[in-house]
Image (cartoon, rainbow, N blue to C red):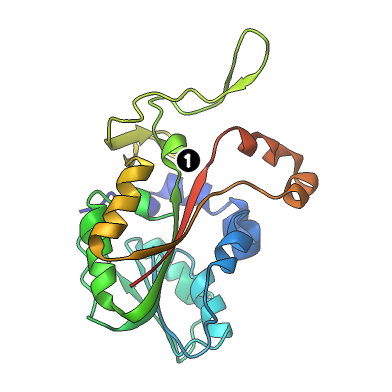
Amino acid sequence: MAQNIYDQPTFFEGYSKLPRSVEGLDGATEWPAMRALLPPLAGLDIADLGCGYGWFCRFAAGEGARSVLGIDLSERMLDRARAEGVSASMRYERGDLDRLELPAAAFDLVYSSLALHYVEDAGRLLAEIHRSLKPGGRLVFSTEHPIYMAPSRPGFTSDGEGRRIWPLDRYLVEGPRTTDWLADGVIKHHRTLGTTLNLLIAAGFRLDHVEEFCPTEAQIAARPELEEERDRPMFLLVAATR
């Protein structure tokens, strides 16, 4: 079973203060790039894996999706999502992405934001997603970029000339990474970029778009602290078709 870090009070309290928690999709720097990968949502049957507060579920319902299923391991997240409002086309379920079983050929779109790096067996999950999509269905997801996740001690340092350095090590050693982010002992699962893409291909997906996300010039102008994101990719964005 996956680590249920989001139900730990310290982690949940810290997460609730992040811009993406307070402002929703507009507080996520990568959202415009993710939105550009989506098909028109009206009339679609959609699953959101790792739905969190349900921001995307509510967005999809507002865009006219026929049905939206939000799945998350965290009861705290699901309670918050339900408290924000539900509609006849939306429902939420608790589920562990490491053990998830989905109905066959049920969805036109599976969406997932920053959840795949918590999954130990990504190959099994991607095969399950492929099975759950209708022919021609789409998968759109983001995950932490492996360059961001790989270091044993993530965090910028400086060299002797004051240049900002991302200390990459153990990139080709795949497996769990334990970091202290919002709480101690957060477990993520590092895979190389090649492994992630090959798992998608092995599951039967056609790759449509792969993006090593970087904020736009306009985003950096509005939030100068984003300038450091040019020194290493933080997120990997992928769109694929069944």
Residue sitting farthest toward the right? 221
Res 79 visible: yes
Residue 35 image-quadrant placement:
bottom right
Q: Secondary structure at mark 1?
A: loop
**In this picture, residue 124 sits left or right of residue 52:** left
| Residue 165 sits above or below residue 161 on the image | below
> Closer to the camera, 10 or 225?
225
Residue identified by numbered label 1: 182
Q: Is residue 66 left or right of residue 127?
A: right
Image quarter of the N terminus: bottom left
Q: Residue furthest top?
A: 160
The residue depicted at 32 percent of the width and 65 percent of the height is: 205
* Left or right for 17, reference 168: right
Whole-percent x and y of residue 57?
Answer: 49, 75
Q: Is residue 201 above or below residue 219?
A: below
Of residues 207 and 162, the one drawn nearer to the viewer in this rendering = 207
Q: Quadrant of the C terminus?
A: bottom left
Q: Residue at x 60, y 60 (%)?
A: 33
On the image, the x and y values in percent for residue 118 come to: 33, 49
* Residue 112 visible within the image: no
Circle 1 packing at 10 Å, graded few (<14), some (14-19), many (20+), is: some
How many numbered markers are drawn? 1
| 138 to the left or right of 234 | left
Taking the spot 23% from the left edge, 55% from the top edge, the residue there is 123
- Return the x and y of residue 150 as percentages of the image width and height: 39, 33
Which residue type does callout 1 highlight?
A: Leu
The location of residue 110, given as percent across then percent down, is: 39, 72
159 relative to 131, above or below: above
When asked about the image quadrant of residue 46, the answer is bottom left
